[in-house]
Amino acid sequence: MTTSTLLPVIDTHAHLYLCKQPLDELLDQARQNNVCYMVNVALGIASTQTSWEMSRQYPQLIPTAGIHPCEVKELSRISELEALLTQHSFRAIGEIGLDYYHTADTREEQIRMFCHQLELARQHNLPVIIHNRESDTDMRAILKEFSDVTKVIHCFSSGQDFIEDVANENTYFSFTGTITYSQKSATLDALKDLPLDRIMIETDSPYLTPTRHKGAENQPAFVREMADRIAEIKSLPIETVIEATTRTACQFFNIALPAEFA
Ligand SMILES: [Zn+2]
């Protein structure tokens, strides 16, 4: 590995508290791969608390607060989320959104919970991390209502028409290991045309292990694989992709720019 491939990268989406590997090993491997920050994304009230506590101990972990659509049973506990947002300085609200793949029968509650959390993002002036699975139609409509909120569509897996509908100066798209799984797809075509300054990279650890590490649990150290794949798809030098995505992530999550790019 050359020095230039070890420019600092940021894993903008991981759930470190769900990984089976010991945390000190994960952080050590991240350090060796110059993953300078990891956004430790919450999925509900308990993991919001956990994400906050972990960030106190490890400053390279960026805390978020939010309730995932598959945890819609926590809709009645949203006041607890509001209290946590008032108590602590989270850097984003997420992950929040819609998921009709796992739980289509809770559509209305999901929409209510999603919109409530988008309102909280407005109130607290925080960016949001959005989960969108088999819910493109409702998602497009809701994002139009909240076009002023800064947001990233995480694990982007829709196509060009979705981007055209939601794109504005506050909207970003983040890519996971899924872009390493196939050679041809609507998402890869969309990625090819998407401006580099709209893109972030993530692992979604412990899920979605990139192809080159197939069989292993996913971890933030693997985030460089996504930069590599984007460079290949867009026919750009990997250094260009790393610098652009790291700068975007720093701005999005309000993180100090690493010395190499300052
Ligand atoms: Zn996730």
Image: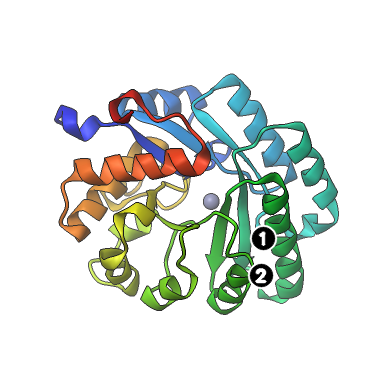
- Residue ID at (25%, 71%): 184
Q: Is residue 89 above or below residue 196?
A: above
- Decide: few, some or many residues near mark 2? Use Cα within 10 Å; few <14, some 14-19, many ≥20: some
Indicate left or right for 94 with 197 as reference: right
Query: Which image quarter holds the C terminus?
Result: top left
Q: Are the residues at dot 2 and dot 1 in contact (C-beta closer than 8 Å)?
A: yes
Q: Is residue 161 visible?
A: yes
SS at mark 1?
helix
Residue 16 spot, x, y in % from top left: 53, 36
In primary-sequence order, the first of circles 2 and 1 is: 1
SS at mark 2?
loop
Q: Which mark is residue 103?
A: 2
Residue 68 spot, x, y in % from top left: 65, 55
- Residue ID at (31%, 45%): 244
- Decide: few, some or many residues near mark 1? Use Cα within 10 Å; few <14, some 14-19, many ≥20: many
Indicate left or right for 50 with 165 as reference: right
- Residue ID at (65%, 46%): 125
Indicate left or right for 164 with 188 as reference: right
Quadrant of res 220: top left
Residue type at tag 1: Cys
Q: Which mark is residue 70?
A: 1
